[in-house]
């Protein structure tokens, strides 16, 4: 049915990447290039009384030493502009920059940093978001520390609880997590290049967000700033605000010195400075009838936003929408809050406010099942959303297939859930015990009512029949370029080798918002499809005229144009050539605006997303009762993606997401003690290795969505959001003990509480 | 600072270099020889992105001082392709979708090559052990392991 789409075609950037030719930010060289470095704060909360840069400035080989005073506009931020490029008067967190230098070599830059004298006065900080609620504001211009409060209301929870036979109250919490992209942040800023005021190359996730920040900080026009994306060594939501800040710094140094300036973080600098996944403290109250039907849920979530607002206004919004899990609950009251603290700031990370609430609501569902004497499968099958269901926010699901039952059945079958669940429910003895657990989710695709949701792409057919394509969305390693080229090749009926993808560049590409929220295939893919259709229409019309046919009589396939009954008319290349010389427009802009949605912030209801994806993951674990060590043996991951544009790349997303979820569940935690970060490199921030791998069974479910290109929806984030919850449920079955905090590492599994390293109180 | 003369062969090419006593091999490769395929992900020997093959052994080039490797032979990712022909491991990585962001890829390839040079027919467990020191945040390792298995088969078939 398809020739390029739905096929496991090779990644178009694979050759460059396996040969070492692919250039990442740190690999770039420019004539006369200087090295930029940043002096970071010594305390997480302090006043800066004095900075003396004279000695640093006088060192040979040092071209610039700059502080907040030298920054034209020092505050940036996509939503709230409170993030300092360099700390001015006040240090808000341990990763704040105090001063920066540009020097001939890294060694000289390091010497210059040492020569900067800073006088601080420590101020007591606020490190707990719950305490932050009542503490005086850490940002002096704010009334209090509340960054955001979102609510959702459905029905009347008091009535719902009154009608319940069983009510459970539970508290869950989650940890700070590092993105762990393997490439530390890197940019090079080049002044006055090809008509731009400054060009920034590097590992930028969101070129337009970074451009907006650089323009703001330089007080320049958006069209004076060129941001060009290079190969990027992973991002997972992480190379946004922190890279914007780096780009601003490098741009300022480059303009000051009139030389290209390269900035590359060490891993330690990356971990101390970059924003993390939000830790959540969650209170859940659930009521159900004795036959296992949910009657009410009341939820309160507090997120630690850290020092800067960053994405905190939006992350808890996704949580407020999805906090009940994918269940029909007649009465719901949910409140989510984000507070400022003096911890490292928190922002977007793959999942974006969903893994936290899924850990809670899916643990809760198992706890409730146990209370009612039901199995995890039974309680879910009784309550899941189905076609025509109304969600917690009051949205009726009637535009696409609500496939929860299908993903659950497929995952259960693949991992033999029911049999194993029964077996592991019997009393176990010995040093190792086994358990199996599950978790399910629904996830709103793309941005939702957070923001405008539109994207553009440009496609141009050349006179030799080759095609180039670019878009405002950017490759982050996930395979966007390949997927976009597949869509273009499919539509034009040409082979992949004829399609070239150009890197994202803010002075060429149409502003398409950010490459986030698993929106690229869905929203960006539609824009590519639209551009390809326009180009194809122009070519069809021209060729049809030549042959005395109508456009609808033509079929584009295998690099040729055919009639409907299969007669070969002309090759694509020849048609393109003739059309070009006849003056036919073969370069087209495609644009796509997502279907309209709305959210009533006051009433706490609405249709927040135009479509959803559904998923189920199941995990089988073995726990060593003597050491608390958890081995994840098997995981099944069933995801309805609408349509798999590239099934092998899609499996890659599933494998990678499952492993990231496993890390979140049992290994990873950025340990923070009174604002100080204790694990600054991979020797003590533990990410999953090949030795931690379970056998992973990826299951692709395809229910094409009317709004997706070829029916495709999303995959990036759903893969990661379920693993921790499924593993937690499996551990609870194995050990008979329920642990309500992540990660489920040795200490928690063995003792039930964490052993805190470090100096301060917990 | 006194300079030390070092003779090394990198991807078959001989180099005579004058290096400082603290210069790391990764910096020699990336900064002096412009072989930027070798990546730095942690600088402390934990991520494996900087893996190269030094006299037949996979090593972390961020932990090695160039001054210590006088007389040695180094192979980096740039040296895998011979006369425009990709190494079977490179081919297999492409075919099995063992690459996402690609930042771990050069190091993975070098660890895999060092393994197959010594053990042409490794088990899945042996492959996992060989790449245990190479972190990959994107792929979840599965397709990397499949690629290494398939390259091993390919190489075996070719040698018979
Ligand atoms: S950079 Fe050498 S092991 Fe990470
Ligand atoms: S492909 Fe990104 S770290 Fe391995």
Image (cartoon, coloured by chain):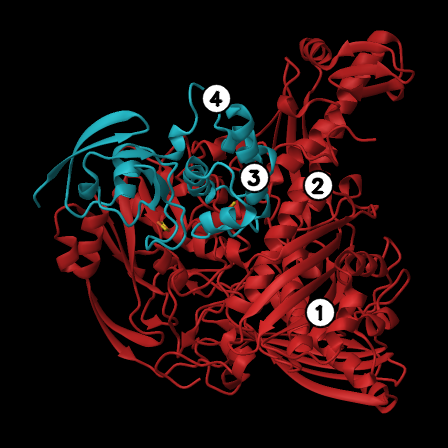
Q: Quadrant of residue A560?
A: top right
In this rendering, which labeled residue sits more in front, label 2 or label 1?
Answer: 1
Tag 4 subunit:
B
Residue at mark 3 to residue at mark 1: CA–CA distance:
31 Å
Tag 1 subunit:
A
- Above or below A151: residue A505: above
- The hue used for chain A is red
Q: Between A344 and B28, which is closer to the camera in this rendering?
A: B28
Residue at mark 2 to residue at mark 1: CA–CA distance:
26 Å
Q: Are marks 3 and 1 on the same chain?
A: no
* Residue in view at x 60 percent, y 48 percent: A513
* Residue neighbourhood size for the residue with mark 2, other residues' Cα within 10 Å, grouped as few (<14), some (14–19), many (≥20): some
Residue at mark 3 to residue at mark 2: CA–CA distance:
20 Å
Disc 1 target residue: A437
- Sequence-wise first label, 2 or 1: 1
Q: Is mark 1 within 8 Å of ligand 2?
A: no
Label disc, if present, on residue B85 of the rendered structure: 4
Disc 3 target residue: B149
Disc 2 target residue: A647
Q: Secondary structure at mark 3?
A: helix
* Residue in view at x 46 percent, y 85 percent: A136
* Residue neighbourhood size for the residue with mark 4, other residues' Cα within 10 Å, grouped as few (<14), some (14–19), many (≥20): few
A243 left or right, relative to A299: left
């Amino acid at each position: 049915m398809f020739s390029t789409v739905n096929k496991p075609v090779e990644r178009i950037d694979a050759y460059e990447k396996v040969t070492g030719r692919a250039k990442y930010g740190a690999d770039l060289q420019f004539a006369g290039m200087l090295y930029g470095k940043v002096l970071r704060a010594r305390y997480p909360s302090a006043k800066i009384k004095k900075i003396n840069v004279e000695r640093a400035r006088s060192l040979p080989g040092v071209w610039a030493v700059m502080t907040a005073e030298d920054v034209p506009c020092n505050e940036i931020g996509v939503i709230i502009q409170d993030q300092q490029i360099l700390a001015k008067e006040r240090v808000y967190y341990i990763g704040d920059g105090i001063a920066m230098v540009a020097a001939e070599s890294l060694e000289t830059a390091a010497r210059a940093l040492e020569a900067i004298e800073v006088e601080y006065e420590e101020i007591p900080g606020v490190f707990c978001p719950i305490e932050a609620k009542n503490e005086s504001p850490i940002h002096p211009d704010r009334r209090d520390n509340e960054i955001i409060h979102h609510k959702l209301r459905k029905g009347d929870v008091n009535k719902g609880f009154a009608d319940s036979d069983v009510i459970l109250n539970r508290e869950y919490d989650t940890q700070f997590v590092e993105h762990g992209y393997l490439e530390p942040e890197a940019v090079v800023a080049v002044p006055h290049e090809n008509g731009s005021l400054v060009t920034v190359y590097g590992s930028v996730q969101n070129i337009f967000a970074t451009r907006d920040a650089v323009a703001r900080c330089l007080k320049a026009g958006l069209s004076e700033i060129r941001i060009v994306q290079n190969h990027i060594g992973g991002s997972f939501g992480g190379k946004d605000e922190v890279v914007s800040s780096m780009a601003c710094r490098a741009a300022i140094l480059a303009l000051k010195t009139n030389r290209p300036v390269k900035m590359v973080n060490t891993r330690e600098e990356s971990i101390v400075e970059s924003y993390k996944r939000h830790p959540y403290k969650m209170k859940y109250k659930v009521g159900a009838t004795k036959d296992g039907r949910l009657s009410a849920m009341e939820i309160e979530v507090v997120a630690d936003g850290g020092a800067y607002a960053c994405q905190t206004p939006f992350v808890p919004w996704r949580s407020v929408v999805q906090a009940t899990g994918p269940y029909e609950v007649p009465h719901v009251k949910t409140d989510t809050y984000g507070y400022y603290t003096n911890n490292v700031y928190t922002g977007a990370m793959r999942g974006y406010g969903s893994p936290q609430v899924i850990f809670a609501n899916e643990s809760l569902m198992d706890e409730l099942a146990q209370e009612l004497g039901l199995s995890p499968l039974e309680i879910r099958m009784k309550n899941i959303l189905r076609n025509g269901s109304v969600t917690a926010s009051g949205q009726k699901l009637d535009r696409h297939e609500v496939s929860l039952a299908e993903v659950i059945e497929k995952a259960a079958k693949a991992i033999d859930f029911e049999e194993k669940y029964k077996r592991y429910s019997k009393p176990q003895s010995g040093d190792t015990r086994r358990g199996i657990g599950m978790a399910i989710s629904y996830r709103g695709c793309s941005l939702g009512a957070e923001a405008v949701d539109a994207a553009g792409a440009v496609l141009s057919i050349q006179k030799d029949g080759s095609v180039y394509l670019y878009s405002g969305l950017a490759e982050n390693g996930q395979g966007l370029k390949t997927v976009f080229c597949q869509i273009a090749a499919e539509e034009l009926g040409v082979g992949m080798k004829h399609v070239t993808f150009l890197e994202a560049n803010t002075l060429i590409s149409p502003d398409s918002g950010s490459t986030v929220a698993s929106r690229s295939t869905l929203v960006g893919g539609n824009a590519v499809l639209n551009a390809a259709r326009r180009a194809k229409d122009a070519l069809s019309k021209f060729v049809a005229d030549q042959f005395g046919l109508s456009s609808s009589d033509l079929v584009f396939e295998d690099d040729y144009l055919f009639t409907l009954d299969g007669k070969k008319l002309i090759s694509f290349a020849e048609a393109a050539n003739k059309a070009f010389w006849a003056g036919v427009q073969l370069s087209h802009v495609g644009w796509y605006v997502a279907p309209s949605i709305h959210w009533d912030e006051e009433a706490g209801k609405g249709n927040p997303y135009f479509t959803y994806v559904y998923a189920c993951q199941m995990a089988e674990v073995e726990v060593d009762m003597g050491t608390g060590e958890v081995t994840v043996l098997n995981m099944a991951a069933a995801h309805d993606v609408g349509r798999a544009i590239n099934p092998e790349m899609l499996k890659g997303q599933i494998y990678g997401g499952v492993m990231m979820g496993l890390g979140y569940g049992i290994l990873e935690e950025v340990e923070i003690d009174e604002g100080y970060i204790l694990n600054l490199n991979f020797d003590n921030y533990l990410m999953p290795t090949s030795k931690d791998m379970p056998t992973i069974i990826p299951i692709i479910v395809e229910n094409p969505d009317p709004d997706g290109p070829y029916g495709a929806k999303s995959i990036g984030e759903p893969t990661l959001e379920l693993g921790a919850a499924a593993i937690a449920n499996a551990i609870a079955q194995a050990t008979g003990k329920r642990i309500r905090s992540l990660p489920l590492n040795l200490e928690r599994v063995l003792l039930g509480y964490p052993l805190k390293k470090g100096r301060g109180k917990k | 600072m006194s300079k030390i003369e070092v003779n090394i062969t990198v991807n078959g090419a001989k180099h005579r270099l004058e290096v400082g006593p603290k210069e790391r091999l990764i910096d020699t490769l990336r900064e002096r020889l412009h072989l930027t395929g070798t990546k730095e992900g942690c600088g402390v020997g934990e991520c494996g992105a900087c893996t190269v093959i030094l006299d037949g052994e996979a090593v972390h080039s961020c932990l090695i001082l160039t001054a210590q490797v006088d007389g040695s032979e180094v192979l980096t990712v740039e040296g895998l392709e011979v006369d425009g022909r990709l190494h079977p491991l490179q081919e297999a990585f492409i075919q099995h979708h063992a690459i996402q962001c690609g930042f771990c890829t050069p190091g993975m390839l070098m660890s895999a090559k060092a393994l197959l040079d010594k053990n042409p027919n490794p088990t899945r467990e042996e492959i996992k052990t060989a790449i245990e020191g190479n972190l990959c945040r994107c792929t979840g390792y599965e397709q990397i392991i499949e690629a290494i298995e398939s390259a091993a088969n390919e190489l075996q078939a070719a040698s018979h």
